[in-house]
Image (cartoon, grey):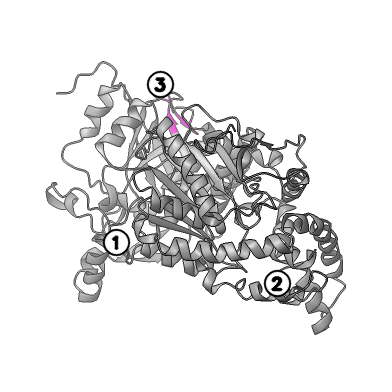
Amino acid sequence: MATIPASCIFSADLSAIYRRDKTSSFGERRRNPVLKRVAVTTEQTSSNSGTAVTTSGRSFVQEKAQRSSEAEAETSLRRVNVEGDWEESRKSLKDYFDEAKDMIRSDGGPPRWFSPLECGAHSPDSPLLLYLPGIDGVGLGLIMQHQRVGQIFDVWCLHIPVKDRTSFTGLVKLVERTVRSENYRLPNRPIYLVGESLGACLALAVAAQNPDIDLVLILANPATSFSKSQLQPLIPLLQLTPDQVLLAFPYMLRLMQGDPLRMAVDILVKGLPLQHEAGEVSQDLVVMSSYHSVVADIMPKETLLWKLEMLKSASAYANSRLHAVKAQMLIISSGKDQLFPSQEEGERLRHALSKCQIRKFNDNGHFLFLEDDIDLVTIIKGTSFYRRGKYHDYVSDFIPPTPDEFRKIYESNRGICVATGPVMLSTLEDGKIVRGLAGIPSEGPVLFVGYHMLLGLELTPLVCQFMIERNILLRGIAHPLMFVRLRDGLLPDLATFDTHRIMGAVPVSGTNFYKLLSSKSHVLLYPGGMREALHRKGEEYKLLWPDHSEFVRMAARFGAKIIPFGAVGEDDIGQVVFDYDDLMKIPYFKAQIEALTGETIKLRTDANGEIQNQDIHLPGILPKLPGRFYYYFGKPIETEGIVVQ
C-alpha cells in the first residue's frame, strides 16, 4: 500500500490548517467540544428515486469620556459574545479524521447520502443542501460547518466508499436522480449544490443537464483547472511506482507551502536557526504523522490513482458543458491552493458564466472548509445567496448576525469607532435628553430618519453602538451599488459590501421599505442618499432631501415611531477641497464619473432639481486630526392613528 503518496496529497494543505485550528481567529484558544457526535449514514433505498433519509489634539475631558465610552463598549461587547458563541462547540480537523476512520472501517456498497446528526436543527421550510465531496470522497468536508449550516439547511452529504469505482458519469446520474426527485417533491424550494474540487465539477455537470431546476451552486476551488494542476504529472508516476517505493514523497513536498515537513527540510538544507522553530515543527510533525494512517486508508494507491483519473475526466466533462449552466453560482477560491490555480480558475469561470460571483480567500489552502477561519454560513449571508423560494427576499430570507459575526465585524472596524469616540444622546418620552440610547424604543417598527455626513462615515459607529448598547439591529436602506452591478468596471468588488449585507442592509425600494416596516424592524433611512454623502464644498450639514417625504405616509400605515436624528463631527475629520463640480470640469475625471455611474442602477431619475444628481464619484478630501462624533436622537414621533392624505 502506497501510504506516503496518498498522505502527501491529502495533507498538503491540512498541516497548515491544523496550526490555525488551535486558536480562533481572534487568538483565543478554544476548548474541545464537550460532546462528540458521529454522522449517521443511510444507504440509498431505491436506485430509481435517488432519495435518502438523512489621541492627540483632544482635551482631558474628551479623553476621559473616550476611555469611559470604550470601557462600556468592551463590557457590552463581552456580554453580547456570551449569548451564543458557537466557536466553543465547533468541530475540528481532528474530528474529521476520527469520524472518517469510523466511516471507512466497515465501508462498502455504492455511493450514498447521509445526514450528520448535528445538522438536524433546521426549520421545515429550509432549502436542501447537497454536499459533493472532493478527492477524499468521505463526505465530511463540511464537518467544521455542520452546526451552523444545519440550522438553515436540510443537509445531505455524499459518501463515496474507498473501494467504489463508480465512474464520474455514474456519480452525475446519482446526484441528478436525487435533484430531480427532491425538486418534484418540493418544486418551490431551491436546491443547493456545495462542491469541492471534484464535487464542483459534479455540481457543474448536474446543473448543465438540469437548467429547468432551481439550483444554487457553491463551488470551492473547482477542479475544472485540472489540466493546469500539479496533480496531473502524478498519474504516470503512480502508475509506474510500486507500492513499496516512495518516489512521490519528494514531489509532494514541493506542494506543501507552510507545511511542517517542508519547514523541517528548509531548516536542514539552509541551516536556519533551530531553537525557535524546532518545538513547533516537531509538535506538528507528531500530530500530522498520527493522521497518515487514516489518510492512507481513505486513499490507498489504487483509489488515489482512480480519483486522479476521475479528476481528469470530470474536468473535461464539466468544461465542455459550461455553456449550458444557467444556475446561480458562487465560487470560493483560495490564494494558497497548492493543488490547483484556484483564483485564476475562479476568474475564468466568473467571466464564462452569467450568474456567477466570486469570493477570494488569499491566505487559505485547498481544503477550504476544513480551515478554522472559514464560516460557510457567513459567506452565504454576506453574498445574499440564502433564499427559501425562487428569489432572494432581503427581509424574509434575512438571518440576523450572530454575536461572533458581529464581534468580527466590530473588530475590523474598531479603528474608526475608537478614532471618532461616538457620543449618543437620546430623548426620553418626557422630553429629557440623556446620554446613551435609553430613549430608543425596543420594539419596532421604528424609523430613524437622518442626515448623511461626508462619505457616510457616521454609519459604522452608529450601527455598532446600537448593537453593543441595546442589541438593536438597524436595517439600513442602501444604494443598489452594494448589491448589483450592471457590468464590470471601476467600482469596488461586491465583496467590499458583504459586511453591510450581513448587518441587514437592503437595496432602496418601496417594496423593501414596506417589508421592513411590516416586519417591525428598526429601519435606518437617509432621504438625502448619495447626493448628501458626496456633498460639495460648503454644504456641510446641509439637508438635501426630496420635496415630498413619502416615508411619512409609509410609516403611518404601520404605526411606526419616527425618530429624527443628526450627527456632527464631519468638520473634525476632513475637508472637501476638490468636489464634484471641480471634477466635472476635467474631461478625464468626467469620463470616469460617467463610467462609474453607468455600472449600477441609477436612482431618482424622475426627481427634479439637485436631488436628481446621484452621480458616483470620490471627492478630494484633506484629512484632519480625528475629532469626535456626536449623535442626537429626537423624541419619537408617534404615527399610530394618523391619517396621511
The residue carrying mark 2 is: 238
From the top left corner, tell me how far across and down residue 224 is, in percent: 49, 64
The residue carrying mark 1 is: 487
Give the quadrant of the N terminus: bottom right
Magenta stretch, residue numbers: 426-437
Q: CA distance from mark 2 to mark 3?
A: 78 Å
Judge depth for marks 2 and 3 and give the one in front.
2
Give the class, few, some or many, for how many residues have Cα within 10 Å of label 3's Cα (few <14, many ≥20).
few
Q: CA distance from mark 1 to mark 3?
A: 49 Å
Label whose residue precedes the other's in the sequence (1 or 2): 2
Judge depth for marks 1 and 2 and give the one in front.
2
Q: Secondary structure at mark 1?
A: loop
On the rendered structure, is 184 left or right of 558? right
Residue name at image x 37 percent, y 42 percent: 213
Q: What amino acid type is highlighted by mark number 1?
A: Arg
Label whose residue precedes the other's in the sequence (1 or 3): 3
Dot 1 and dot 3 residues touching (CB under 8 Å): no
The residue closer to the viewer here, 261 or 395, is: 261
Q: What amino acid type is highlighted by mark number 2?
A: Leu
In the image, residue 436 lies in the stretch drawn in magenta: yes
On the rendered structure, is 93 left or right of 639? right
Q: What amino acid type is highlighted by mark number 3?
A: Glu
- The reply to whether residue 635 is in sight is no
Residue name at image x 46 percent, y 35 percent: 182
